[in-house]
Amino acid sequence: MLILGIETSCDETSAAIIKADRNDNKVKLLSNVVATSLSLHAKTGGIIPEVAAREQIKYIIPVIKESLKVLKNPEKEIDAIAVTVGPGLIGSLLIGVETARTISYIWKKPLIGVNHLFGHIYANFINDLPSTIDHLPSAAPEFPAIALIVSGGHTDLLLMEQHGKTKWLGGTRDDAAGEAFDKTGRLLNLPYPGGPYIEKMAMGINKDIYNFPRPLIDSNDFDFSFSGLKTAVLREVQKTRVLDNKTTAEICYSLQTAVFDILIKKTLDAALKYNAKSILLGGGVAANQTLRNEFKLKIENYPPAGGLKIELCVPTKSLCTDNAGMIAAAGFFNYKETNWQKITVNPELYFD
Ligand code: KG4
Ligand code: ZN
C-alpha cells in the first residue's frame, strides 16, 4: 500500500510517500519533502508560532505536490493519508490536518491521525538508502524495545512491547534535552537552534572541565530534569570575563557530556530492567554524532566484558528531525482510520 504522510507540527512543512505491504516490517520511502522556516526563526532566536504557521500556509500545497511527483496517478495510487494531529503548535497543526482532511474527502481516502512523538520512534522502521546508513540495521528493530525520544519539546522513555503496545516509563519534569541546548546556546551567543552548534563547538575538546551536575541520574526512575543545567552554564558565563571561542567550546563539551551521560544511563537502565532487545533513538537530538557514538560505545562495553546484546537503532540524521516519512511509517504500523469529519488537532497530545 502507499501512504501519503503530512507533518506540520512545528516549523517544518513536510509531505512523504511510503510504500509497505502487510507483512513488511520496514517501510520504503519513495519521497520525503521538507520545507523549513528555520532561517526566519534564527533571526528571532526561537520560533514565533504565528510566523511558522504563515510560512506553512505558503509551503503546504507545493510540498505535497512535490512529494507526489514520484507517482504517475496519485489520486488512484494512494491508499491512505497519515497526518500529525499533535502535539505541537495549534496553528501549525491545523494547516496539516485541514489539508489532509480535504484531500481525504476529495480523493475518498482513509485518514489516519498520528501522534508526532510516535512518529519520531517510527523513523527507525524506515528502510533507508545504503549510502546514508549510520548505525541503522537493515532488519526491523526487535521487541521488546526501549525508545528514547529526544527533541526540542520532548524527552521521553518508552517501553515498546509490539506495535501499538507501549508503556511510557518517564520523561522530563522541566526542559527537554533539545530545549536545554537551545537555551544554553543563546547564553553562549550561538545561533538558533543551539543543538547542532553546540555539537560543532564541542568537537575539538576532549576534557570535561566544568563537570556540570547530572540531575536525577541516580533517581531510580526514568524521569529527567535539564533546567538546572541552564543555570549552571549561566553561572559559568557570568564568571568568565571574556567568552572566547575556547571557553565556549569547553562549556559546550561539558554540557553535552552531562546531558548525554544522563540520557544514556537512564536508557540503559530501562533496557536492562525490561530485557530489551533493541534501543530506538528518535528526535532532533538523536542527530548528534557524539550521542550516537557514545550510546554505541556504552552498549558494547557494558559490563566491561562482552557488552550488552542490544541492537542500537538510530535513524539517518535527516529522519531524526521532523519529517513526514516518519509520520507515514507510524500511520502504517498503527493503522486506525478516522473519519475526515471527526479528525481534530490536539496540541497537548501526549502518551495514553
Ligand atoms: O525533533 P525536532 O526536529 O523538533 C521537535 O519536535 O522538537 O528537534 C529539534 C531539536 C532542537 O532542540 C535542536 O537543537 C536539536 O533538536 N538538535 C540537536 C542536533 N540537531 C538538532 N541537538 C544536538 N545535536 C544536534 N546535532
Ligand atoms: Zn519532532
Image (cartoon, rainbow, N blue to C red):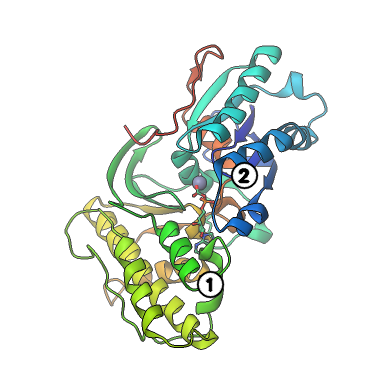
Find disc 2 in the rendering and name its residue.
12
Q: Which mark is residue 154?
A: none
Residue sitting nearer the eye, 5 or 39: 39
Displayed quadrant of residue 211: bottom left
**Image quarter in which the N terminus is found:** top right
Question: How far across and down, in percent of the image, does residue 349 sit?
Answer: 40, 33
Q: Pointer 2 and pointer 1: residues touching (CB < 8 Å)?
A: no
Image position, residue 135 (x, y; %): 52, 62
Horizontal and vertical percent for residue 260? 38, 68
Q: Is residue 15 visible?
A: no
Residue topped by disc 1 = 189
Mark 2 vs mark 1: which is more N-terminal?
2
| Residue type at numbered disc 1 | Asn
Regarding mark 2 in the picture, which secondary structure is present there? Answer: strand
Callout 2 environment at 10 Å: few (<14), some (14 to 19), or many (20+)?
many
The residue drawn where x is 31% and y is 76% is: 212
In the image, 300: left or right of 36? left
Ligand 1 closer than 8 Å to label 2 CB:
yes
> Label 2 vs label 1: CA separation?
24 Å
Q: Residue furthest right?
A: 72
Q: 131 left or right of 221? A: right
Residue sitting at x 45%, y 76%: 252
